[in-house]
Amino acid sequence: MTVRVIDVRESVMARNNEIAATVRQRVEAEGVLALNLVSSPGAGKTTLLERTLDALGDEMAIAVVTGDVQTQNDADRIARHTSALVQAVVTGGACHLDARQVDRALEAIDLAHTDLLVIENVGNLVCPAAWDLGEHAKIVLFSVTEGEDKPLKYPRMFREARGAVMTKIDLLPHLSFDLARAVGAMREVNPELEIFLTSATTGDGMDAWLGYLRREVARASTAHGALRG
């Protein structure tokens, strides 16, 4: 008897990467910056996004795609902070979003009148690291309520990310969390990582995060103008 083994995962990943390339082409064709927010559950992605929309919603057009395992609670929260349509993707148990889901979500988004696309991925530091959604950068959130060695335990996610947002720093006086050790762990895994120390509750550090978004949105717009010119 002859047995033929089919690597389903490899086939699925290859197809995902093809769709992700299409997504990236679509957003770049309109000069849109696409960011993929990733983190452990409860690290503060939704709260950070709420404060970001409050701060930048009047100066740039921000589209949001949220991913959750079972509910659209995060999308409902975010929708209260923007007049734009928020796309909710309920994965039904899957631990990450995929490029096909993002591609379908873009059908309801007017990319020609969008500056920034934010994809709030499912709370997980393993699965989303391997899946390209067509974003320009992964931004990993890391809460001070987690262990300082989180980057060493989940190195691929921190290597894949271009930015890291430390969240809930207002809680530091009440915790034994060693911030210097945590930053050192991130630097050990990814020396090029741009790190932001923030509290969405108090506003500490938010100016640096918002400045990063303004800079990168302007860069994407300039690149688009150069291509068209």
Image: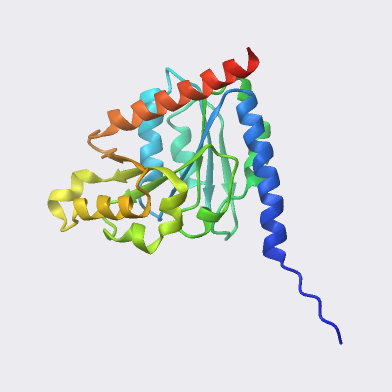
Q: Is residue 184 left or right of residue 100?
A: left
Tell me: 104 left or right of 85.
right
Pick the residue in front: 21 or 143: 21
Judging depth in this view, the residue of 189 and 196 nearest the camera is 189
Q: Is residue 222 above or below residue 108?
A: above
Residue at point 66%, 56% (across, down): 13
Residue sitting nearer the eye, 80 or 218: 218
Asked if one can make out residue 109 in the rendered structure from this viewpoint, the answer is no
Horizontal and vertical percent for residue 52? 38, 31
- Outermost residue on the left side: it is 173
Q: Residue 54's quadrant in the figure?
A: top left
Residue visible at 41% across and 28% down?
213
Give the farthest residue toward the right.
1
Q: Quadrant of residue 27?
A: top right
**Residue 131 visible in the displayed image:** yes
Q: Is residue 6 above or below residue 52?
A: below
Specify the quadrant of the image occupied by residue 192.
top left
Q: Quadrant of the C terminus?
A: top right
Q: Nearer the viewer, residue 55 or 166?
A: 166
- Which residue sits furthest top? 229
Residue 196: x and y, percent?
A: 30, 39
Q: Is residue 212 above or below residue 46?
A: above
Q: Residue at x 70, y 57 (%)?
A: 12
Image x and y of residue 202, in percent: 22, 36
| Residue sticking out furthest to the bottom | 1
